[in-house]
Image (cartoon, rainbow, N blue to C red):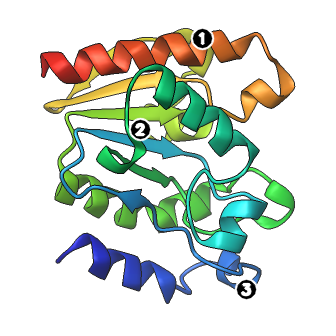
Amino acid sequence: MSLNEISEEIKTCKLCPLHKSRKNTVPGEGSSKAKLMLIGEAPGVEEDEQGRPFVGRAGKILDDALKYANLNRKDLFITSVVKCRPPSNRIPTLQEIKTCNPYLKRQIDMIKPKVICLLGNIALQTFFKKVSISKLRGKAIERDDQTYFCTYHPAAVLYNANLKSKIYEDMMRIRKLIKKS
C-alpha cells in the first residue's frame, strides 16, 4: 500500500456524514520520506475548496513559521486528524475522529516520521487523552518509539497574536529534534 493508495481511499470515503457536505477530501500531502509529520485538526474552507492541507489563513501562518525555522514544506508531510471539513468549521466529533483514525495511522506507519508535530488540542487529544496544549506545548514526548511534539494550532494566532512567537520557537525546537534523531 502506498500513500497515493491511501489518498484514493480517503477520496471515496463515505464512512461518516462529513462526506455529504465536503467539496474535496484533504488526505494530506508531502514527502513519503518525511522526517517531520504535522497533524492538524480538520480542513477549513480553503482546504475543502482546494483539497490541500493548510492553504488558508492558518496555512500562511504555518508556512511563515516553517520558513523561519528553515523547514521546507515539500520535505514534510502535512495532514489532519479528520480528512473532510466539518460543517461551519465546527470541532470534529469523537466519532468522526475515530472513523478517520485508521487512515491517519496508516499514513504514520507508511511514512515513519522521526517527529510528529501535533498542532492544537484536537490533534494532541487524539494521541494523548485528557491533556491540554497549554500543559504540553513546546515539549517532546517519547511514546512507543515515536517522538511527538506539541504546539498551538496556527489558527490560534488569528485570535491571539501573542502565540505567533511561541509557534516560531516551537518550529525551531522541532528542527533541532529532527537533526538529533
Numbered-mark total? 3
* Element class at badge 1: helix
Mark 3–mark 2 CB contact (< 8 Å): no
Q: Quadrant of residue 171?
A: top left
* Element class at badge 3: helix
Q: Residue at label 3?
A: 20
Label 3 to label 2: alpha-carbon separation? 27 Å
Which quadrant: the N terminus?
bottom left
Q: Quadrant of residue 9?
A: bottom left
Label 2 to label 1: alpha-carbon separation? 22 Å
Nearer the N terminus, badge 2 or badge 1? 2
Amino acid of disc 1: Lys
Q: Residue at (66%, 33%) from the top-left corner? A: 61
Left or right of 90? Residue 7 is left
Q: Residue at label 1?
A: 166
Q: Residue at (33%, 28%) from the top-left corner? A: 148
Where residue 109 is drawn, which disc sits there? Answer: none
Q: Quadrant of residue 131?
A: top right
Q: Categorize mark 2 by other alpha carbons within 10 Å: few (<14), some (14-19), many (20+).
A: few
Left or right of 57? Residue 94 is left
Amino acid of disc 2: Phe
| Image location of residue 160, percent across then percent down | 82, 18
Q: Residue at label 2?
A: 127
